[in-house]
Image (cartoon, grey):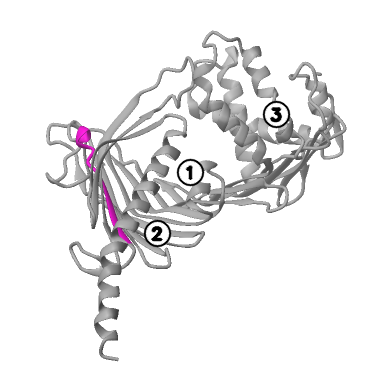
Amino acid sequence: MNKLVPISASVVILGALITPKIVGTQVEAKLNESIAALNAMPGYKVEVIEQDLGWFSSSSKLAFSFDTAMGAAGLAGEVIETKANFDAVYGPVLMGESTSLGLVGWQLSVLADELREALVWPKDVAFYHVTGTSDFFLNGHYQDAITQFSSPKVSNTQFEFSGYQGVGSYTGELFSYQGSADSFTAENTEGVFKSNNLLLKMDIKGTIEQVFSSGFYDSDSKFSLADISYQSHFTDEVLDIKNTYITASSDIDDGSQNIAFDVVYGVDSVSMNEFEGSDFALGIQLNHLSKVFFDQYKALLENSSTFDENASLEDRMASLSEFLLPLVSANPEFNITQLGGTIPEGSFESHLNTSLVGVTSLPQPIDDVAFWLSHLLMDGQIRGDKEVVELAAKMFMVMQLQTNPQTQGMGKAQLEQIAASQVPLLLQTFVQQGLIVGDDTGYQTALSFKDKVFKVNDTQVPLPF
């Protein structure tokens, strides 16, 4: 029995010595895979410019560049370049600032020294830094940060950013992330801008390979800013916006592989001097989008350098039409799920649903309007409180009067007075024509399009084609 103790200890020690080399080989392979995946994306280029591979750790210096033209032929863009350091330590014993058990520990530091002419932050500090660890079950945790920075003292606009911190984890095919920043302030001779309490939350269901290879995966995310304000130095104008947010989700159908996107842009409240508004929201939904189309389009972008820069628009459309059918035959939808808000005069709300249905082949020529209208469906509704609609009608009349030669030279107050006197007659005319429906509280309009027939409420509106 006593003989087993040194044997077992030897096995443990041997494992601790051999494991780092095995893990290191896998980390190096994964790093090369990630670099290859980034280089396959339009506009991105990553290369290893220096590497030191050890038994228990490794260090790599990387060069990143991004062409804002994304490789599109004939499009001039700016190339953004920076350098980064990637360091890794290998388990089972992770040696670093602190000692722990795990499979691998790593850190990526983006130096971004080329930004120091425009931004000021501490020397010997990376502009962006992320650290992570993976345990023996390949579950990971990571933390990232953008350093605090400010403007140079000689800048006409003085600004200061508090810095950004984030934490995340991944288990199998689920990535979760949350980041925040306290404040950003900018001031010049015109005024001062402030924003506070930025928050980002994200959940992604998918493998790293899916994220890099296609960019499509099931996800939910939210971006929000608690406060945005602007104070003019020359007037008493004060803009104050509370809780600006963007929520987004994406979903890939397991069967059809079609993609759905849902995005909502919103603001809880806006105030500027005497104006106050609340609950503004715009919701956009895209359904039944063919993943096959986007995969083919991605391949087209990657090979765009082989295109003739002098090719006509017709020739480029012909290239697109070669794989356009999967997109339009999936019955794609574009919906405005909500568009509304509340202002002092009252509330307004609307929605619009559109879709292409029954497309089994493409027309020749591809821009055959009659063909596409025969497959178009649309329905929607717009509703507003009485005073809101009257205000919109008044603003419309003012714009008309400003272009009328007979009223040119009149002041704003006089134009608004004339417009206000004409609003009742204008709305009454729309009601008589069936374009709007009114009651004691407000007005509404229903829109529909089917079989190439466009209707406003129940009134058919002739089309110019």
Going from N to C along the chain, the mark reached first, 2 or 1, is 2
Answer whether residue 165 is visible to the viewer in this image. Answer: no
Question: What is the number of the mark on residue 39?
Answer: none
Q: Magenta span has 244?
A: no
Q: Which residues are magenta?
A: 104-115
Relative to 301, residue 217 above or below: below
Q: Quadrant of the C terminus?
A: top right
* Nearer the camera: disc 2 or disc 1: 1
The residue under label 2 is: 178
Of the two numbered discs 1 and 3 in the rendering, the one whose residue sits closer to the viewer: 1
In this view, the residue in front, 281 or 230, is: 281
Q: Residue furthest top?
A: 310
Amino acid type at mark 2: Gln
Gap between marks 2 and 3 measured at Cα: 37 Å
Residue 413 percent location from the top left of the image:
50, 29
Secondary structure of the residue carrying tag 1 is helix
Front residue of 154 and 116: 116
Measuring 21% from the left and 64% from the top, which residue is drawn there? 95
> Is 446 in front, or is 407?
446
Of tags 2 and 3, which is closer to the observer?
Answer: 3
